[in-house]
Amino acid sequence: MVSAARNLYKNAYSGLSKETWYLSIVMVVNRSGTMVIPFLTMYCHIKLGFSVGQSGFVMALFGGGAILGAFIGGRIVDSWGFYPLQLAALLAGGAMFITVVYGHFYFKHL
């Protein structure tokens, strides 16, 4: 039975290119990263002392930013190309994570 299922899977997906498999793996890793969102909401509420409404508002801002960012990113990729945009987004994302961490400590001690 396991052998039959394995053969069925192998026959169904063996024709896909290497690039398709790489893209699938990257998408799984990317989607797995979104599992942090519910825990970020709990962190805002429990550790940072936000109310449930404030935590929900932060997550709503996150969702709105994701939608707006996807729209703007689509426009920019049409003009810049995918590689320069991807590189700029990775560098800017890292810089923003560092900014948020230091900003949190700065505003916490005011």
Image (cartoon, grey):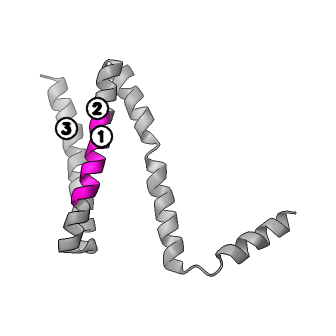
Please name the residue that numbered disc 3 is placed on: 102
Q: Mark 1 points at which residue?
A: 62
| Mark 2 Cα shell of 10 Å, populated few (<14), some (14-19), many (≥20) | some
- Which mark, by number, is residue 19? none
Q: Which of marks 3 and 2 is nearer the N terminus?
A: 2
Classified by dominant secondary structure, the portion drawn in magenta counts as helix
Horizontally, residue 38 falls left or right of residue 66, namely right
Say which amino acid is labelled 1. Answer: Phe
Secondary structure beneath dot 1 equals helix
Residue 105, image x and y in percent? 20, 31
Image x and y of residue 67, in percent: 29, 49
- Pick the quarter of the image with the C terminus: top left
Please identify, in this view, whether the residue under mark 3 or under mark 2 is nearer the observer.
2
* Residue at 27% in and 73% down: 83
Question: Is 46 placed left or right of 91 in the picture?
Answer: right
Q: Is residue 3 visible?
A: yes
Badge 2 is on which residue? 58
Q: Which of marks 1 and 3 is nearer the N terminus?
A: 1
* Label 1 crowd (10 A; few <14 / some 14-19 / many >=20): few
Q: Do the residues labelled 2 and 1 touch (CB within 8 Å)?
A: yes
The span picked out in magenta is 60-72
Amino acid tagged 2: Val
| Amino acid type, callout 3 | Tyr
Say whether residue 65 is magenta: yes
Camera-side residue of 14 and 48: 14
